[in-house]
Image (tube, coloured by chain):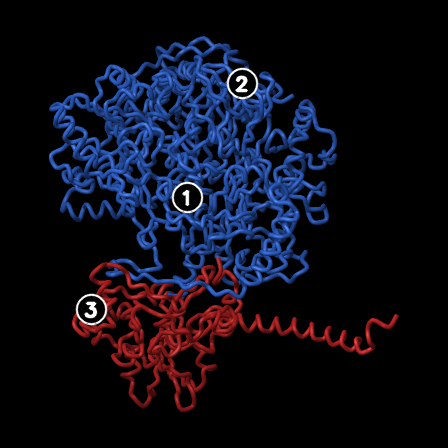
Amino acid sequence: MSGQKKDTNLNQTPMTLAAVRQELKAVKGKKYWRSIDELSDTPEFQAALEKEFPGAAQEWVDPVSRRGFMKLMGASLALAGMAGCTKQPDEPIYPYIKAPEDLILGKPNYFATAMPSPTGAVPLLVKSDQYRPIKIDGNPEHPYNQGSSDVFSQGALLDLYDPDRSQHVTFRGENREWAEFAQEFRLKAAASKDGTGIYFLSSTITSPTLARQWSEVKKAYPKATLVQYDPAIAGTSLEKGVNVQYSLADADVIVSLDADFLSGAGFPGFHKLVREYAERRKSPEKLNRLYAIESTPTTTGMKAEHRLGLRTSEIPAFAAELAKAVGVAGVDAPACNWTGEQRKYLAAVVKDLKAHAGKSVVIAGLHQDQSVEALALLINNALGNLGKTAYPVDPLNPLPSDQNADLKALVTDLNGGKVDWLVILNANPVYSAPADLEFTAAFQKAKTVAHLGSHYDETGHDAHWHIPAAHFLESWSDVRAYNADVSIVQPMIDPLYGGKSAHDVLQLLLNEPGLSAYQAVRETWKPVIKGDFETGWRKALHQGWIDGTANQAFGLGNAPTPYGSKAPAPSPKDSLEIIFRPDPNIYDGRWANVGWLQELPKPVTNLSWDNAALVSGATLTKLGLEEQDIVELTVQGRKVTAPVIVAPGHPDNSVTVYLGYGRSFAGRVGSGAGFNAYLIRTADAPFYTTGSIKKLEGKWGVAVTKSHFQDHRSKAMGGQGNGNNSLEADEAINERGIIRYATLDEYKANPGFANEGPGHEKTDKSVTLFPNWEYKENAWGMSIDMNSCTGCNACIVSCYAENNIPVVGKQQVRIGRNMQWLRIDTYFEGDLAAPRAHFQPMACQHCENAPCEQVCPVGATVHTPEGLNAMIYNRCVGTRYCSNNCPYKVRRYNFLLFSDFETESLKLMRNPDVSVRSRGVMEKCSYCVQRITAAKIEADKENRPVHDGEIVTACQQACPASAISFGNINDKQSKVAKLQDDERSYQVLADLNTRPRTKYVAAVLNPNKELEEAPVEHVPVKG
Amino acid sequence: MAQLFDRSSNALARMSLVLTGLIVIALGVTLDQLQRSPWVTRQGQRPDQPVPFSHKHHVQGLGLQCQYCHVSVEKSSYAGIPPTKTCMNCHAQIWTNAQLLEPVRASWATGQSLTWTRVHDLPDFVFYSHEIHVNKGLGCSTCHGRVDQMPLMYAQNTLQMEWCLDCHRNPAKNIRPTSEIYNMAWEKPAEDRPVWCAVGGEKSGLPTAQSVSCTTKDPGAAGAEVASLQLPLSPEGLAGDVAATTLPAAPIYKKFTSQDELGNFLVDHYKIRTPKDLTSCEVCHR
């Protein structure tokens, strides 16, 4: 390969795009880059690289004069001296009056429950400390997710303790009691006799009990109307009850038709699909092959062996072509000028699918035209995949409906003055209803509006009654997971603010208005649970699901589709398509006030705290825009302003906007972030439309974490010597072997590829100034499988919750001060317009020969006898030398007081086993040392070694792909030791002799030879 | 013009330099001592408590065992402060009208916690676990002192880092048999106070408490009975009829007459980690 090819300095004249392309062309081997700026080396990028923490000095210079600064510092020095002598304040102890029987103070309890979601519930096991839920994880015994979780279910913890949740029943802004509402609602309903004029608008009903309660309400009040509306679900086939499930365990070839099934829980069955996909990626002997045809870059496309970026309206046509080619009868493909590359791709996919008939699967995108779902089913049928890898099954949610049509009808009734009572259950239509329905105006015409919601949000402000909703961790309910097992949602804590659930509201109209949700749920399952009910019920609560409910709900029907398979014609090539997608972090806006999720860099774009108009480089050039320019998006006369950023691999002439931002009453975190894409979204075109884009004045200033984490050490110290470089830039410019992978053929020819060649040197243990320490008993290590990791971010949010990591806010993220201990580095490779990405989770590597330890003047970061790189917060004085000397850039510094020591509700959430860090302290991944210590204490009590698998780190626990393994590398039988001894395992920057304890297993891809040869060059992306 | 400074000023100048040095040193020593003084550590201080609870009366006088109130000391990092219910177990029957106990009855009646002031208070960045210390042979009185002789609770020790490290560097000097953990009057073995210990079944997986059996009565003189009472029962033995099971061959007891010998023996058999492990920062800080 060409490691030495480019030794010219980055700091020379900026490369033109042509030069960049030349650069890439000349390279036969693998070449990686992280952002286009980095590759083309723009002056802006250089400026951003100037400092390790860009803009770090700002805080000090601007608001405080030098004189003021000296005064402040003088005072704080004096205080610091005094602080050493002050006593700790008296600490009170509040013992129980009567201690609960099964509580051992200081030891957590674990309870099974489930998180409701319109795409299928996530079964959970919640860690509870003194009956306060402090960590959410997947239920390890549940057959569906087997212990894994996702960003939403992890973030739900902060949502529970959100200090901005509404806390009072209000009527026109005045505090009232629930009983007053209950009485009024019940009387009004009774007065209507048959329910005329009573309307319910609910988010998608997922609870069988709620559905049962509704059917009873309907019996009592036949004219009452229920409308379900979930902006991310309305308009998909899922809302109508279509439910095709996939099993990837036996699928050799997977074709995704705009199905983003690897990114997050927004796709039904995410946990199972990722697990099964990743399982096949673990060993090169059983690799599957993924083709992704997609309209916006997602981790699914980036992980695919072969990705084809198509404009979203072309995908139904492509699906029709695919159906025709695999031999589905009676399919009419609309005309489309396919390019040679697209034809070639289609031919290759068809050939591969036919060769793997019965062992392949075509997955339809949730947010595609519904014909794609039908076509995918027909293709799977033609290939004989039905019943093997694809199963059409009964609806996931109990009350399928056409949500957009129902909402339209509701608006008509509202405008017609027919609505006396509109009861909104856990929905926020004022914010999220399609713009063309003019919902807000219609809504004012209802005589009384009651809103049940967790926040006093946009709808809450406009409604007459507002009732605080109980969080799912505070109330009883029931839900179905993707595999249809029914889980009981059991509360972990009494409602913090006296919240009520939808069950309570519907029950008001029934004979026993006071019947609790608990009793209602029990009533539903009494006929289902076999044997003694109490025993069965307790078992269901304990294990997290009700036995026998999975099969009962399912029938292997033969492709009943309530819609046609006729693909619509693609929009003209030169029209600008606008694609609406639920946000990967905050979904439809429901998680907008969860700081962890707002701050989380989105997959592929690494954008946090904002949404943006995502475009391709070519479109950006064509429109004469620059990144972060403010643009105006116009759809049918409706306008919204947005920042524009480039998403590598985005199809040309189309723009992706994520929903869920631009909230006005989300709370202190979510209000005001991003722009509201619902303002240009219409009911008839919920997921894509055409529109126009216009440049406005000014720049938006988005927080993209791509160019953070710079290394500016000298050459002698192992850096690049030019003052500023990121790990990623190193990789782009030199062969540092940070990302190593091979194709299956390359692997077969040379299984040891990962540890050979330039830049792939192994550590030489004899090169050391200090005597080598011998690790006798335990030696903790981690192994991360690069082939399995899909970059879904679940690990990062899990780490937030486990390690009390603070949220810093957009401005701090912009200057590189985000505190996540774990980040997922995305390395793009290949063609600028159609890249592949490699996702590399990067946290402290726990180097045996750690550069940070050698420079700490106060011994605040030291090595433990078991090989952990420990961080002693109470010793740290904040010199930041350690971070400066860390080649992996994984240390995080509390520049300001980021941890919230004031807000009461957040104190309840904290993990009591981890210190909450204050200002001026460095922190970083500890390998979850609190879990290691707990396991060691258990083992020591029993006089035995720690068993393999006894210690599970928070990231490992959350990972749906099981990409992370942790354990004792001295125990040669342990999973992690076996993985670390694998010939594909390598250490990042091993040539620096840091001897990292985290090893990465190099990826092996399984490309189709026909497509691999002579790839098509794309048009320039940036001028 | 006359000299501004007299020659004697030189001596004064030197003096003042020396004096300054002394003052700096004195200040340093003072601060250092202050840091270790009971004013900061609260060693020996008896804070005001809602009820002047006497450990002396309850432990020494009535013979309550530590775990009657501190229930989770063997199971959790936190030893546990008893709920009001524990007090009421007895005080619903006796001293029902005592003025002193009014706060307890009020707590019971109103459901409001009694608000105690923590006497043994570690900083929040220190993570201490009772369970591992108790399970590895560190007695209550080693850290908490003769609680059975304290009418009002106070901290016997500073609980400062140097005090912790003093033991973590050499646990042998404080380790006692796990059977003696709650013995407030335990004293280090001596010539006239020997301890006999025998190694039990040292199978891996056997809890520490069962790995060694110790007695303060001469097992030879008192007969095998005393000793065998402390012998670990194998799972098979538990399953079957205890009387019918043949006792294992009489264990060989070793006599210890000094804490060093006993401590090192127990450190060995309780598999207590090495000082290198025990003084590693992450053991207490994370």
Q: Colour of chain B?
A: red
Q: Residue furthest front?
A: B1
Determine whether A397 is above or below B209 in the image.
Answer: above
Q: Amino acid at mark 2?
A: Asp
Q: Residues within 10 Å of mark 2 (few under 14, many from 20)?
A: many
| Badge 1 element | helix
Q: Residue at 39% of width from left, 61% of height from top?
A: A938
- Quarter of the figure with residue B32: bottom right
What chain does mark 2 sit on? A
Colour in which the image shows chain A: blue
Across and down, in percent, residue A26 comes to: 68, 27
Q: Which mark is residue B89?
A: 3
* Residue A953 locus on image (x, y percent): 44, 50
Q: Which residue is mark 2?
A: A652
Q: Are marks 1 and 3 in contact (CB under 8 Å)?
A: no
The disc placed on residue A958 is 1
Question: At numbered mark 2, what does the secondary structure look like: helix, strand or loop?
Answer: loop
Do marks 2 and 3 share a chain? no
Tell me the subunit letter for badge 3. B
How far, Cα to Cα, is label 1 from label 2? Answer: 35 Å
Tell me whether circle 2 and circle 3 mark residues in contact (CB < 8 Å): no
- Secondary structure beneath label 3: helix
Which quadrant, please, contains the N terminus of chain B? bottom right
Q: Which circle, 1 or 3, is nearer the viewer?
A: 3
**Residue A49: image x %, image y %?**
65, 37
